[in-house]
Amino acid sequence: MARRKDHSREELTQLALNAGRELVMAKGPSALSARNVAKHIGYTPGTLYNLFDNIDGLAAAINTQNLENFAETIRIILNEEAKPKKRLKKIAQAYLDFQTSEPHLWALLFATPIQHQSESYHCAIHLVFDQVTAVMKQLGYSKKTSRQNAKILWSTLHGVCLLRSSGKLDVSEVDTSQELVERFLNQYFKSSLT
């Protein structure tokens, strides 16, 4: 069994983050426990509580990394595409792709209640949300309306993904999430955007 002196605090933190991420990816958010992570890295659960206040602190740290990664995906989209409507469609598709490719990480981030607040977590949320709000502002809306429009977009995407992940999206007829989001955005652009 490794001992504390074998790793610095920063190294232990990164080991715990990597182990937590791997556990969530393999088995879902319910696999994220101090016992499981500690066993994975060869330390005691008490070591984790020296690094994080509680398991929600570790979950928030994993989510912070995921938000930062998604913010980078949005930055790439914004650099590659100049037109606001196309930017929003590509951001929406990236969100759907994230939920499809990493469903357990998506569930930890967007469908698992976490009782933890930190400056880094708050900043990571805004790295994502503020970029979408800025695209909405390019369409000529006020700051407040742009922020509300961004919330509407995220809420719609989240609802589609949540229903898809629970198998309830196609209860009556089969419609792909891409088709539904595309239709929503087209209707949204017609009725709300200039």
Image (tube, grey):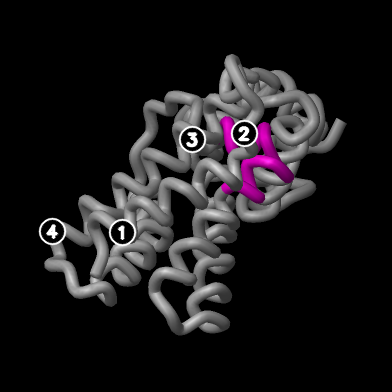
Q: Earlier in the sequence, mark 2 or mark 3?
A: 3
Residue position for label 3: 110
Q: Quadrant of residue 17?
A: top right
* Left or right, 57 with reference to 155: right
Circle 3 Cα neighbour tier, 10 Å, few/some/many (<14 / 14–19 / ≥20): some
Between marks 3 and 1, how big is the CA–CA gap? 28 Å
Estimate the spatial distance between the alpha carbons at disc 1 and disc 4, rounded to whole Å: 20 Å
Q: Amino acid at mark 3?
A: Phe
Residue 33 circle label: none
Q: Position of residue 151 (x, y in %)?
A: 30, 47
Q: Earlier in the sequence, mark 4 or mark 3?
A: 3
| Residue depicted at 22% across the width and 61% down the height | 146
- Which part of the image, by quadrant, shows the N terminus? top right
Q: Nearer the viewer, residue 194 or 160?
A: 194
Q: Nearer the viewer, mark 1 or mark 4?
A: 1
Please report the bounds of the magenta region as a residue range.
96-108
Which residue is label 1 attached to? 190
